[in-house]
Image: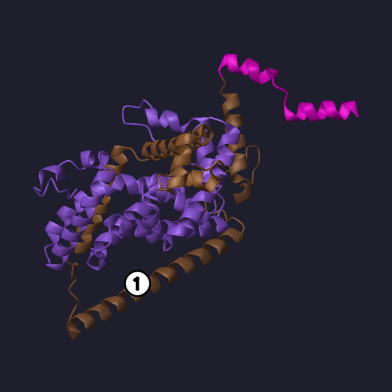
Chain colours: A brown, B purple
Amino acid sequence: MRSKHLSEQQLVAASAGDAGTADEHAHLSACETCRARAGRLQALLAEVAAVAEAEADARFPSHRLEAQRSHILECIEQDGRPAQIIAFPAGSRAEVRTRRVTTRSRWVAAAAIAGLAIGLAVGRWSHRQPPVALSLPGTPPADSEIWAPGSDRPATARGSSEDEFLGQIEQASTGLLPELRAIHELTPHVEQVLAINADGR
Amino acid sequence: MPSASRRGGPVHAASPTAAAQTASRSHLSGDSALASEVKRHVLAGERDAAVERFAILLANQQRRAARIAFQYLRDVHDADEAVQDAFLRVFTHIARYREDLPFEVWFTRILINRCLDVRKTRARRLRWTLPIEAAAPAPEPPDGSPSIEARLVSGARVQAIAAAVETLPERQRAVFILRHFGGHSPADVGRVLGLTESTVRVHLFRAIHRLRALLEREGP
């Protein structure tokens, strides 16, 4: 029997279940220290293997494996099916018809583009022009010619929305309910604020 | 799903889930014969019969394949992709299967090659993009309660073991995974990876030595 303990490599080989030499076997069965070392190593390897298996099995539960299996078999099924053949258009007539359709569709597309360009150009041009009062005296102003309250000139297109808004406020303030009127009177007007500021200076 | 049961296959093919769950090393020897049958049917042009036999082979090998791929790639989606590709390749190239080799060795070689491809693709992807999410949490069973395995996976010890295996150099890790998680003998590991048996033993020894140093220091 060997007196020297088993080397690390011999121990690993023995723990992995590999057949060692007769000497190694004899030493392992006789030496308590080496048996304990081998036992600890075997326990560690068993733990690592068990944990790895449990971890992989938790990530791949049965339903996942089933889905995977279905997918693999589906792919094989589809791979085996003959490819669908799409009939290729044959003959010159079909080609001519295709060309005609293409030409017509090109004209339609060109007309659409031209229309769009003209529309844009006209839109920009009219935007730059000052608004013209098209209404005759006595006729109600059009939507684009909202008259600013208290002025005898139609508002410009730019200021129309502002004026419209202010006009609505004015209109609302004149026809207020008595309860709201009290609040309105408590609210300082711009002129009042400006006057107070001017006095303060 | 074009399962064997739908096709009226043999009794054990009618429940591929059960077959997958009981997939163990005892199945492995029979799978070489199954693969030979698939090959024979494919060569004879009997596609339906080939797919039916292949479904059983798939059910028998799937669990082991998923374990190896997951340990190798450490990502569920990548492992899923590698396993699916490997099985599809097996069916496509079954005519090349040599009956003198155990099917598990041939299949594992294809699987490892797919894993390497997926790893390369992932490395390329990571070079150009930033990872936006951490690893997906362990899936829970349909009833919503976490399984025993899921609870086990969340443990610190499990994380330590996974991290220790991850630190192994590529070759050592492959050898260790195939030997201890895949259940291959050192000779078969050598055949899968194209190494001599003595080289496999050296890698295995170094891997265990390193794991031991890392894990015994931490304690159970």
Q: Residue at coordinates 36% horizontally, 56% vertically from top-left?
A: B188
Q: Quadrant of residue A173?
A: top right
In the image, taking residue B195 as reference, residue A107 lies left or right, namely: left
Magenta range: A177-201
Q: Residue at x 41, y 36 (%)?
A: A50
- Name the image quarter holding residue A60: top left
Looking at the image, the residue that sits furthest to the left is B8
Query: Residue A139, percent across and down?
Result: 50, 46
Q: Determine the residue positioned at 51% across, 64% down.
A: A120
Which residue lies under the disc numbered 1?
A108
Q: Is residue B123 visible?
A: yes
Residue at the limit of the structure toward the right, as seen here: A201
Counting from the top left corner in percent of width and height, residue A9 is at: 52, 48
Helix, strand or loop under label 1:
helix
Packing grade of label 1 (10 A; few <14, some 14-19, many >=20) is few
Going by the numbered disc 1, the residue's amino acid type is Val
Which residue is more in the foreground, B220 or B88?
B220
Q: Residue A142: x percent and y percent?
A: 50, 47
In the image, residue A189 lies at what x, y percent? 72, 26
Label 1 is found on which chain of the structure? A
Judge whether B200 appears above or below A183 on screen: below
Q: Residue at the far front: name it.
A: A1
Q: Residue at x 19, y 56 (%)?
A: B33
